[in-house]
Image (spheres, rainbow, N blue to C red):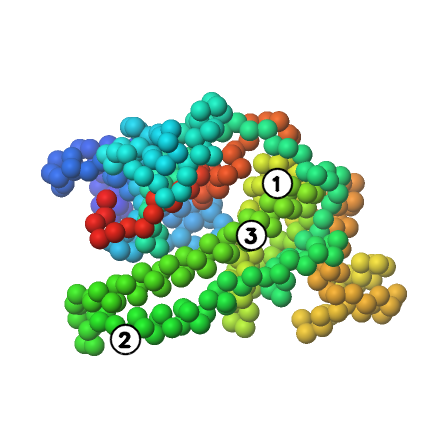
Amino acid sequence: MEAKAAGEDIQVPWTFFELRRAWNQAKHEVAPWWAQNSKEAYSSGLDGLARALKNWQDSKQGRRAGPRMGFPRRKRKGRGTESCRFTTGAIRVEADRHHVTLPRLGRIRTHESTRKLARRLEQGTARIMTAAIMRTQGRWFVSFTCEVTRSMAPPRRPSAAIGVDLGIRHLAVLSDGQLIPNPAPLLRARLRLNRLNRQLARRHGPRAADGSLRDPSKGWRETRRRLARQYARVANVRRNNLHQLTSELVDTYGTIVIERLNVAGLLKNRRVAGRLADASLGELRRQLAYKSAWAGISLIEADRFFPSSKICSRCGHVKAKLPLSEREYQCEHCGMVLDRDLNAARNLAALVASTMNGVAGSGPETGNARGWGQALPFAGMVPDEAGSRHQVMDLGETGTADW
């Protein structure tokens, strides 16, 4: 790139196919050991580099929303997610429901049962496209990207609309009066995490007092594994609670109304940043978005500046100011007294009528919903950043020898 910027006639490989062509031409000289590993290991790295270069270029030229992306950096061993994606070769789920076969790795036993995906494959309603392995929190996982045909059942109340007000005190307050408690898994696990962190600091770690590197002790490694498991449990509890809430909403109501919160801006408030991150409101909105598309229901997002908490849900009077310290909404016009979160949820639910009539209503938007009976992704799968759906299965904990 520097030579081309200086005016030299040099072709810079940029896309995945160009990078792979350049790698195939140079691998015999720069990496004579390349044949000892699967070719997919190199393809995964080249694919990540191509996507990182595109994100950097789009961000630099203003075609990518969000924070500005920097130039790709090399991945260091031990940092980042260790993963590899297989696109060719023997990729299958064995009939015994407890083994999978992957290229170069062979037949591997899984900690979790593969029966849900195996049944789909046997019935001919699913087809495996790719497989990816990754190690996170001391465990190996395999995820299969599949093409699945499934007819989604309609919600139990297809004509009902529900307003969902998200928050910290309660994870969600529904317009029908339901209060969904916030499990706050990180807050509940703080004592265990603090104790393990103090124990880790007392152990013989990889760095000495003068900053030089050394071999960590066996106790330090064990404490680090226990700490990683505790953080993994916190993430799993949070994710499971969000999936249960979003699935229940999608299976019950035909229309869901939520607010488009500025989560990144809210996290800048140091007083509530920890609780907000523990609630993971952005993940809740993401799950509602793709699950509502799967189920064929409408998801309406109120505008970021829609004053849902300041509007009286009975008479429509709008307050000029409503500080966070006031937990009850008291209307000066009609005298209504109501919990502020429940009042906001009712105002969100009231947006359905104006949206369906084609009125903007302070900027609500409707999501595109697909009809029932079409080829929809497998409900047991989760979308990754690229939009693919895949089912993740646990391969168990890693031992002293990694494969």
Quadrant holding the N terminus: top left
Can residue 184 be seen by looking at this rendering? yes
- Residue at coordinates 29% horizontally, 28% vertically from top-left? 89
User: Residue 329: x percent and y percent?
Assistant: 77, 67
Q: Give the SS element for disc 2.
A: helix
Q: Amino acid at mark 2?
A: Arg
**Whole-percent x and y of residue 315?**
86, 59
Type of the residue with mark 3? Leu
Q: Which residue is mark 3?
A: 242
**CB contact under 8 Å: marks 3 and 1:** no
The answer to which image quadrant residue 321 occupies is bottom right
Vertically, is 35 above or below 304? above
Going by the image, does 55 lie left or right of 266?
left
Is the residue 329 above or below the residue 128 in the image? below
**Farthest residue toward the right?**
334
Res. 347 visible in picture: no
Q: Comparing marks 3 and 1, which lies closer to the viewer?
A: 3
Closer to viewer: mark 2 or mark 1: 2
The amino acid on which the numbered mark 1 sits, given as a three-letter code, is Ser
Relative to residue 263, is residue 332 drawn left or right? right
When the figure is inspected, residue 376 is found, relative to residue 231, above or below; the finding is above
Say which residue label 1 marks. Answer: 292
Residue at 68% in and 74% down: 325
Q: Which residue is mark 2?
A: 202
- Relative placement, left or right, of 185 versus 46 is right
Gap between marks 2 and 3, in whole Å?
A: 36 Å
Sequence-wise first label, 2 or 3: 2
